[in-house]
Image: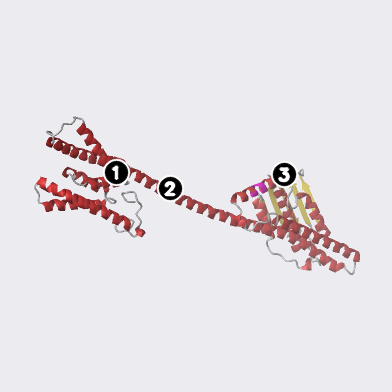
Amino acid sequence: MTTTGEVHRAAAGGPWWWERRRAAVFDAGLAVASAVECAVEGVPFAHKAGLPVWLGVVFGVLTGATLVLRRRWPIAVVLVSVAVTPAQMGGLLTVVGLYSLAASEMPRRIIGALAGMSFMGTLIVFVVRMQQDSAAHTDSFQVASWVVPFLVIITALGVTAPPLLLGMYVGARRRLMESLTERNESLERELGLLAERAEERAEWARGEERTRIAREMHDVVAHRVSLMVVHAAALQAVARKDPEKAVKNAALVGDMGRQALTELREMLGVLRAGEPVPDRTAVPLAAVGMAAAAAASRAEEPGAEADGPSLAEVEELVEQSRAAGMVVEMSVEGRVRAYAAAVEQTAYRVVQEALTNVHKHAAGAKTYVRLAHRGVEVAMQVENEPPPVLSAAGAAGLPSGGNGLVGMKERVAGLGGVFVSGPTDAGGYRVSAVLPAA
């Protein structure tokens, strides 16, 4: 920041302290004009002081040339103008110096002090000149006593006040523009940061959505298809020996397939519910936030209609595993009541995935399913005994992606619950989860 309040930019190409070449040329022109004026006024000053004329001219040129420093050192310019005021020279120097000082970033007390010095110097010079003129023309005309002081004060004010006020106005306007520019740049930076954060949140939301869809697809496909494979293996084993049982198993396979298709269709319907949306990143952040808040509020309402299964369907899930040949015992503790849709769906998926893992890794093992309705939470546990000798159903070779336990843990942790899984001392496997009721 220069003394005149203008931002100095090295890249602007101006010499020394000027930000532009045009400003340097303008100041040089003012300095030349002031030097010529002071040189002309230096001639009578040299006669009055008894000095050689050339010395008065040189003194005037040097004095007027100091105006070239007005942007860098406005105080020096004003002091020089005050110093040469008794010599009755430097009118342009005084006016431009006061303007440059008032437009600078100098403290107001310094500006006021120097402006007062310039005013008093100009006032004294005009008083002396008026008295000399009055004495020289005393015989010609007489004037009232108040005319001379009045004219002196008006003239001194006319020389000092206008450039001072104009400089203060220009300086205030420049500072206001700089403040607005800085505020605009600050707002642009803040908007840029907000846009980056919004993009990060959108990317995080897309990642969460992909993870959720992957979990849903895994839960739907893995369980239904696993039961279909188990029934298909049993169907292959009894097709010739027991046609009636083969027909029953074929019907179960068909039912499992239809249920899987139904759940997949419902999931795809949820994904397509927001169409048409040409670009998901173009959706306003406020709209996304309101939609997410509305969905969350619906999901948190007890008894609200869920997009997926609920705890009431766990018994049906157990019956399907029994129909596939698994020995399952189910027990329910506490008073059955409705929970938030997300809680019921997560509890159902935990039991479903645990039973699917039993089909995959411990075919024929006896399994225990326990549900406990407590005051502020609901707990579920699926435990299987050690598997017997590999049966025909278990020899079907069901693949495992290794994401089932991870998905269950993510679901439970997302609701603030606790998930524990691991082998038992008897050689079986246990999956336990506790979910908050609210």
Tell me whether circle 2 and circle 3 mark residues in contact (CB < 8 Å). no
Residue 205: image tag: none
Quadrant of the rendered image containing residue 164: top left
Q: Which residue is drawn at the image coordinates 72% and 44% (left, top)?
A: 302
Packing grade of label 3 (10 A; few <14, some 14-19, many >=20) is some
> Whole-percent x and y of residue 334?
76, 44
Q: Which residues are magenta?
A: 291-295
Alpha carbons under labels 3 and 1: distance apart: 77 Å
Instruction: Please name the predominant secondary structure of the magenta segment in the image.
Output: helix
Packing grade of label 1 (10 A; few <14, some 14-19, many >=20) is many
Residue 302: image tag: 3
Please give left or right for residue 50 compared with residue 373 in the image. Answer: left
Alpha carbons under labels 2 and 3: distance apart: 53 Å
Amino acid residing under circle 2: Leu
Q: Is residue 17 visible?
A: no
Judging depth in this view, the residue of 131 and 23 nearest the camera is 131
Q: Residue furthest left?
A: 50
Write down the residue under mark 2: 180
Q: Which residue is drawn at the image coordinates 77% and 53% (left, top)?
A: 369
Amino acid residing under circle 3: Pro
Write down the residue under mark 1: 163
Q: Is residue 251 visible?
A: yes
Amino acid residing under circle 1: Pro
